[in-house]
Image (cartoon, helix red, strand yellow):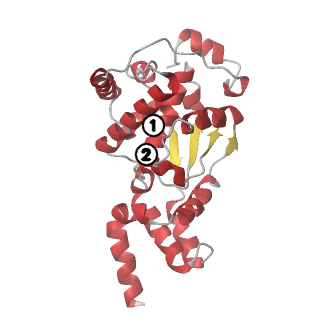
């Protein structure tokens, strides 16, 4: 018991370093648990756009370890999550702010960038790390794993400035590979920069300031010599969340 407690405490302190080393099958189990805490549903149109980006990945990409899926959560929160095991979650509040196919691709590609570095595990921190340890040591269906899982069911993703910049770099590269240009990479952030209100609070609190992200992305585009071109309109009725979407597109984000 003493040894177990020592291991438990050691993992608590070092989880952000050790969590990315857990087996993918255990990570998938953790992701399924988290997904079960959300009121989410599959969305074929979103999945199609994710699959189009995945098709651009090189053969040796570490992302091939995952079977990716994406679902939609009906919430006004402007946010997206990269859950363990390859499952992305897009909040309808974010989707309502998207103006083009290219912008949506940038959002999805950015989340893929977190998976490439396994930031999604580091960002979840100690609660997830301890749960994964319990599942690895005692089995995914064990009482210890179940108890630990309850402690991180309400977790929040927090990434460092360095992690966000790396994910933006990855996202920009994948966006350009998909469309042949970097158009749409900064559009969402340009609109977000002047926004206030509770719907944007989490995104503004948990990510670098939009102005900094715009400057960083523009610098990347210039240094890489990526061309810019017009974006494509967002197609597909499945992505039009509600009847006032047209008004949102015409008038801009609501206050």
Residue under the image location 41 percent in, 85 percent down = 4
Identify the residue position indicated by label 2 in the image: 114
Left or right placement of residue 40 versus residue 127 in this view: right
* Up/down of 247 relative to 149, above or below: above
Q: Quadrant of the N terminus?
A: bottom left
- Asked if residue 45 shows in the view, the reply is yes
- Asked if residue 78 shows in the view, the reply is no
Direction bottom: furthest residue? 1
- Nearer to the camera, 204 or 187: 187
In what element is the residue under mark 1?
helix
Residue under the image location 53 percent in, 73 percent down = 135
Q: Position of residue 133 (x, y in %)?
A: 46, 72
* Up/down of 131 relative to 165, above or below: below
Q: Residues within 10 Å of mark 2 (few under 14, many from 20)?
A: many
Identify the residue position indicated by label 1 in the image: 110
Residue under the image location 71 percent in, 28 percent down = 238
* Labelled disc at residue 148: none
Q: Position of residue 54 (x, y in %)?
A: 55, 39
Q: Position of residue 224 (x, y in %)?
A: 31, 25
Figure quadrant of residue 41: top right
Q: Residues within 10 Å of mark 1 (few under 14, many from 20)?
A: many
* Up/down of 156 relative to 25, above or below: above
**Tag 2–tag 1 contact (CB < 8 Å):** yes
Q: Determine the CA span between mark 2 and mark 1.
A: 7 Å
Q: Position of residue 129 (x, y in %)?
A: 43, 65
Direction top: furthest residue? 250
* Up/down of 75 relative to 142, above or below: above
- Nearer to the camera, 140 or 118: 118
Direction front: furthest residue? 59
Residue under the image location 60 percent in, 77 percent down = 142
In what element is the residue under mark 2?
helix
């Amino acid at each position: 018991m003493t040894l177990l407690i020592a291991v438990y405490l050691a993992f608590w302190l070092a989880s952000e370093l050790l969590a990315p080393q857990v087996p993918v099958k255990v990570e998938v189990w953790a992701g399924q648990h988290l997904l079960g805490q959300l009121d989410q549903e599959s969305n074929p149109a979103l999945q199609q756009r994710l699959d189009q980006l995945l098709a651009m990945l090189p053969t040796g990409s570490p992302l091939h370890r995952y079977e990716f899926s994406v679902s939609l959560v009906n919430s006004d929160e402007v946010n997206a999550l990269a859950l363990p095991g390859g499952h992305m979650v897009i909040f309808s509040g974010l989707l309502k702010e998207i103006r083009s196919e290219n912008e949506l691709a940038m959002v999805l590609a950015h989340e893929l960038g977190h998976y490439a570095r396994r930031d999604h595990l580091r960002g979840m921190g100690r609660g997830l790390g301890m749960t994964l340890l319990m599942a690895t040591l005692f089995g995914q269906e064990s009482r210890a794993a179940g108890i630990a899982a309850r402690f991180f069911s309400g977790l929040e993703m927090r990434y460092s400035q360095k992690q966000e910049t790396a994910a933006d770099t990855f996202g920009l590269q994948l966006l350009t590979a998909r469309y042949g240009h970097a158009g749409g990479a900064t559009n969402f952030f340009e609109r977000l920069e002047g926004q206030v209100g509770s719907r944007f609070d989490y995104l503004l609190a948990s990510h670098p300031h939009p102005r900094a992200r715009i400057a960083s992305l523009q610098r990347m585009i210039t240094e890489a010599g990526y061309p810019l071109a017009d974006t494509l309109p967002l197609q597909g009725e499945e992505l039009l969340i509600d009847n006032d979407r047209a008004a949102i597109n015409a008038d801009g984000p609501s206050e």
